[in-house]
Image (spheres, rainbow, N blue to C red):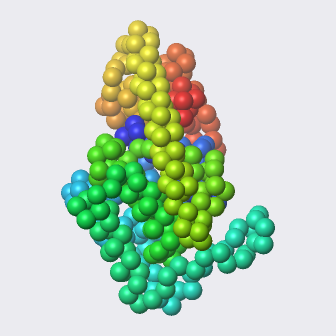
Amino acid sequence: MLLVNTLSLQEAKTSTEIENIFTTEDELYKAISDTKKNENTNPATKEVLKYREALWAGYQNLQDNSQINKKLIIQIFNQIKETNSGYRPPQANIVIKRGQSELRPGEIVYTPPRNEQIIETLMDNLIEFLNDDIKYPIDPLLKMSIAHYQFEAIHPFQDGNGRTGRILNLLYLVSEKLLSQPILYISKYIILKKEDYYYKLSAVTQRNSWEAWILFMLDAVEKTSLITNEKINEILMQMETTLNYAKDKIKWYNKEINEALFSQPYIKPKVIGNIVNKTSRTTLTKYMNELVENRILRPKKTGGEVYYLNDDLLRIL
């Protein structure tokens, strides 16, 4: 839960930013600290949360099936877009255009394949390529790089292809046991080199320039693996330091409380109440005040709500 609510949330936020959907960390952390669905959550934040839920549901699906399949891919898309549809219909005139900030904005740069059966056939071929290591005995990192291009070129859905494709990258690495959980902050690398990402994708289509594209993706995996491991280690070290400090200061503080404070950067008193089995507002206020007095948490009032921030975790993230 610590990794899902922290690092995979960062991945979700950045992956949606690649699609020009922006939310603030403040909005995001407030949203995940609210256990009830909040109708006031802004649309961009909801998009990020849907991405995270799709990533996690896909991971759970993999535990049962161990391989990427059509059902899993469509499930990811449906969760991201909150729909029940499958691959795009043949009459959908989907084209890829230049962005408004680019030279010749609105110009069509790519038309994905369009036919009654062709998307199904191409996606079946892609799924076979990922899963059949006898017919395609290629290193998994190379397969992931090739398959990511292929998925984006097929463009099987009417929308949400970029986000679905990036989730598939992580789940494929899990299926190949290169990741134990789908936690890899790869979208950070992509957004820092966004122009390069799209340029190299299109160069494969236009000039068959595979080498530059594969090297780009391998570099992304290498650099983000190092960064992700570093962040995990920093969080674990900070957790240990906070636990040792707080146990000496607060008699009711324990390992479970400590883990809860590091499972998300914004905490509600109810989170503590559930662990210590206390529901009295007076008691919970006293507990939260102790955490604030010892500078373990910091209160932040937003509207009529008070959130408690773990500044040590926020700094690392």
Residue nearest the observer in this picture, 276 or 153: 153
Q: Nearer the viewer, residue 316 or 137?
A: 137
The residue depicted at 23 percent of the width and 56 percent of the height is: 66
**Looking at the image, is 156 positioned above or below residue 132?**
below
On screen, residue 286 versus residue 194, left or right, reads: left
Give coordinates of residue 277: x percent, y percent: 31, 31
Res. 282 visible in picture: no
Q: Is residue 217 above or below residue 111?
A: above
Percent across and percent down for residue 84 are: 39, 76
Image height check: is 123 above or below 39?
A: below
| Quadrant (top left/top right/bottom left/bottom right) for the N terminus | top left
Query: For residue 312, what is the image quadrant?
Result: top right
Which residue in the rendered view is the most extreme toward the top? 248
Residue occupying the point 51% across, 90% down:
91
- Tell me which residue sits at (48%, 47%) in the image: 218
Number of callouts in the render?
0
Q: Nearer the viewer, residue 39 or 304?
A: 39
Image quadrant where one finds the C terminus: top right
- The x and y percentages for residue 47 are 53, 60
Instruction: Give the image location of residue 121, x and y in percent.
Output: 35, 80
Residue 280 found in image quarter: top left
Q: Residue at x 37, y 74 (%)?
A: 123
- Position of 202 compared to 11: left or right? right
Which of the pair 145/236 is nearer the observer? 145
Query: Is residue 183 in view?
Result: yes
